[in-house]
Each structure stands twice: as structure tokens, then as C-alpha cells.
Amino acid sequence: MKKIVVLTGAGVSQESGIRTFRDSDGLWEEYRIEDVATYEAWENDPQLVLEFYNQRRKQLLEAKPNLAHYALVELEKKYDVQIITQNVDDLHERAGSKKVLHLHGELKKSRSSIDDSIIYPIDGWELKLGDLCEKGSQLRPHIVWFGEAVPLIELAARLTEQADIFIVIGTSLNVYPAAGLVHYIKPVIKKYLIDPNDCKTDGIENLTFIKEKAGVGVPALVDQLLKEKE
């Protein structure tokens, strides 16, 4: 069975009502990155950081997977599909995708602030000051903040090397280290990029650029790939 590796970004979840950071009405209009998404912010004002992610979590609980999420599940009928996502939501899983690797963490989980291996699911949408791990330290969002290492990037690179087809959806290929995954793809394999915006694709061989929103472009590509297997 051919292996498809899919790299997804904020554009996949946007049509589910998840606000992105970089658009005109994005989250950074209200918050400075330095104030809510760095370890320094956590040290300076943990209450603000917790409130920021509580509000995002509350929004996520009201969101539902969209056509793009469900289309990727359909691919699993005839392909071995591995999703690598930059998103911290669980919409891929809720749609039914079986293999999802979260590069930047998961919004519905917390972890110890002194031991990264201690991770808990969050019941509901609130994480509060005073919520402690088993070692007695404050729980923090299970999120990779700006300036922090991306612990799963090496695993993502190994999975990317195995791809027979590589699909990028809803990300500009400007956010590193995730954008660097394209360098691990075999030059000869087919690559697809689905995004409504102009993207820098210089030097990427065998690339088909589908300039559509995820909810339109992904179902169309999935339909094409499934027909190729008939």
C-alpha cells in the first residue's frame, strides 16, 4: 500500500472556525507573541498565558471537522496515510484520521512544567493556576512555544522520507522547522500543495500547486488519488 504523508497547517482548521494567527482578524491582532506564546511569557505572567489557551480550548470544543478533515480520512481506504500537523487542535482525530503526529503540541493536553514526560488530558476547557502534576509543579499547556525545541521534528523527518506521495495543506512553508520537511522528500515523488495564497515553491520538484481553500482543494485531490487506485 502506497504511503501518503500529509503536512497540515492553520488553513485546514480555519474553515472550522479556528482563528489563525497571521490573517487580518487573527489572534495576534489581540495578543503579542511575546506575551502569550513564549516560555518567558509563562514565567512573567502565567495567568495571562493560561487564559489565552483556555479561550482557544473553549473555541475548539465548539468547532467541528470540515470537508478537508473528512476527505483525508477517505484516503485511508486505499492508502497508508500519515498526517503531520502544525495545528494543536484535535480536528483530524475527531474526523477519524488514525495516524496524526502533532509537531507543536496539543491544546487539549497539559504537562508538567518540570518534567516534559508527564502529560495529562484536560477535562473541559480550563487549566488553572494551582493545577499541579504528580511531582507538585504547575501544569502548563502542552504546546511548543516560540523559541522552544520541536521534540518530534526528527520523527516527522523520518516519516517524510518514507512518503510515496507528499501533500501540504494550508501552510505557507515559511514556518520552520516544519517547512524544512520538504527537504526530506525524495525528488522523484509527486508533491501537492493546497493553499489559496501565493506560496514560495522554488526548487521543489514534481510539485502541483492547487490554489484553493482546503475545503475545496483537498476533497478534489482525494477524489483524484482514489480514482488512480481503481
Image (cartoon, helix red, strand yellow):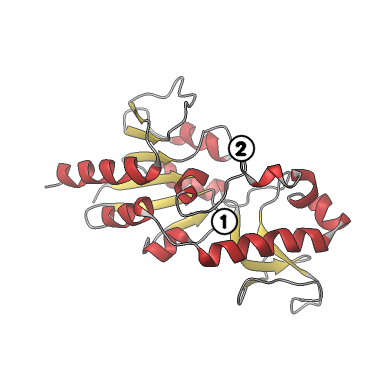
Q: Is residue 212 left or right of residue 112?
A: left
For the point 52% across and 46% down, the residue is 10
* In front of the other: 29 or 120: 29
Q: Which residue is mark 1?
A: 88
For the point 35% across and 34% down, the residue is 192
Quadrant of residue 169 within the rendered picture:
top left
For the point 76% across and 49% down, the residue is 38
Give residue 96's position: percent from left, percent from top.
36, 64
Q: Residue furthest front?
A: 25
Is residue 101 placed above or below 119 in the rendered structure? Answer: above
Question: What's the amino acid at mark 1?
Answer: Val
Give residue 47's position: percent from left, percent from top.
82, 63
Helix, strand or loop at label 2? It is: loop
Q: Residue furthest left?
A: 230
The crowd level at tag 1 (other Cα within 10 Å; few <14, some 14-19, many 20+) is many
Q: CA distance from mark 2 to mark 1?
A: 20 Å
Number of numbered tags placed on the structure image = 2
The crowd level at tag 2 (other Cα within 10 Å; few <14, some 14-19, many 20+) is few
- Residue 196 marker: none
Quadrant of residue 211 within the rendered picture:
top left
Q: Residue furthest top?
A: 202
- For marks 2 and 1 on the same chain, the one whose residue lies earlier in the sequence: 2
* In front of the other: 101 or 64: 64
Question: What's the amino acid at mark 2?
Answer: Ser
Give residue 121's position: percent from left, percent from top.
60, 73
Q: Is residue 155 left or right of residue 68?
A: right
Quadrant of residue 115 within the rendered picture:
bottom right
Is residue 40 placed above or below 48 in the rendered structure? Answer: above
Q: Which residue is mark 2?
A: 24
Is residue 230 placed above or below 125 in the rendered structure? Answer: above
Q: Nearer the viewer, mark 2 or mark 1?
A: 2
Helix, strand or loop at label 1? It is: loop
